[in-house]
Amino acid sequence: MESMVIGGKMKNFNNVYKGKRVLVTGHTGFKGSWLSIWLRELGAEVIGYSLEPYTEKDNFVLSHLSEKMVDIRGDIRDRKHLKEVFDKYKPEIVFHLAAQPLVRLSYDIPVETYETNLMGTINILEEIRNCENTKIGIMITTDKCYENKEQIWGYRENEAFGGYDPYSSSKGACEIAIQSWRNSFFNPKDYEKHGKSIASVRAGNVIGGGDWAKDRIVPDCIRALEEDRDIKIRSPKSIRPWEHVLEPLSGYLLLGQKMMEDPIKYCEGWNFGPNLDAIVNVWEVAEKIVKDYRKGNLKDISDPNALHEAKLLLLDITKSRFELGWKPTLTIDKSIELTAEWYKRYKNEDVYQLCIKQINEFSKLGE
């Protein structure tokens, strides 16, 4: 489908999403809103199921997505409501992003984190199992689902799941549940009987416009810059696989295309991480944002007694490169440039059009 904005052609994934009913859980969130915009521009009938947006400045709110898609408020822990949504809209494809996504918050609400992330995922898996129309399920977890040994090489898809904190361990548990449901109810050997294909995807630390979550480095930087405060850095030396939001989303959409074309081959776990140049520490990311804004001051507030967060976490993306033909498009500097562009322009521009412009630019760079 041609973009609404002049300046390039949007990657269309062989038009497999055109006319499809696609359910996105967590569509009011950061990644979910960007995915919903992209799917809508690909011609999909997008149904969103999520809690309220985090703030009035979220990408979902400013892009007026509630007027452009089926927008349902709901909690993935509410099995009865989920069933009503599946029964009414009969989605053909499900992207499950809804979650409690914050490590530090998970220490405050560990039970709710598990209820949302694990039981919410199981509820989605069960509705996929019971809805005859649903053929594809792509379950979004995280790079933190792996048992992190602080090793200097990236984790591969076949490595052990785990997690130190409640958030990470809840996502490791999600992966085990997804694996169990695939083996028990969606086994590719029995595809002719059940007709469903389920995959899980793990991305790195995602940045981009429209994220205002607490305790994430980019939103923390932007809030401080807008309020002319020092940018306080909790874990300056922690190294993460940083990637722009459009990187993993392009991987999810490509995987969905591949699963529609060959539902048996691709129903596995997949990593979608950045190139090596984007694996830098938190302080360096903040420095790059300050450089782009040409203002700001960084302040190290690291505390040796702070809650545990991983210091080193990397992803190996060899499998996605060779088996899907996916690869990262952006350098770390370009990722931060696009991110900063959104935050500089959101107050004075049509945010939906700004997002499409960035999707087009990303698509062109990836050609």
Image (cartoon, rainbow, N blue to C red):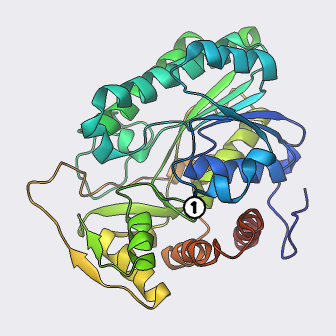
At 37% from the left and 47% from the top, the residue drawn is: 155
Relative side of 345 to 202, left or right: right
Relative side of 324 to 19, left or right: left
Relative side of 13 to 275, left or right: right
Label 1: which residue? 210
Above or below, comparing residue 132 to residue 30 in the picture = above
Which quadrant does the N terminus fall into?
bottom right
SS type, badge 1: loop
x, y percentage for residue 101? 43, 43
Q: Can residue 15 be seen in this view?
A: yes
Above or below, comparing residue 275 to residue 122 in the picture = below
Q: What residue type is labelled 1?
A: Gly
Name the residue nearer the viewer: 209 or 323: 209
Name the residue nearer the viewer: 130 or 270: 130
Counting every numbered tag in the picture gives 1
x, y percentage for residue 192? 76, 12
Which quadrant does the C terminus fall into?
bottom right
Name the residue nearer the viewer: 327 or 77: 77
Q: In which quarter of the image is residue 241?
A: bottom left
Q: Is residue 325 visible?
A: no
Above or below, comparing residue 31 to residue 199 in the picture = below
Name the residue nearer the viewer: 318 or 22: 22
Above or below, comparing residue 23 to residue 300 in the picture = above
Question: Dot 1: few (<14), some (14–19), or many (≥20) neighbours within 10 Å?
Answer: many
Outermost residue on the left side: it is 305
At 72% from the left and 19% from the top, the residue drawn is: 86
At 54% from the left and 10% from the top, the residue drawn is: 184
Q: In which quarter of the image is residue 208?
A: bottom right
x, y percentage for residue 4? 88, 64
At 49% from the left and 66% from the top, the residue drawn is: 275
Outermost residue on the bottom side: it is 294
Relative side of 211 to 73, left or right: left
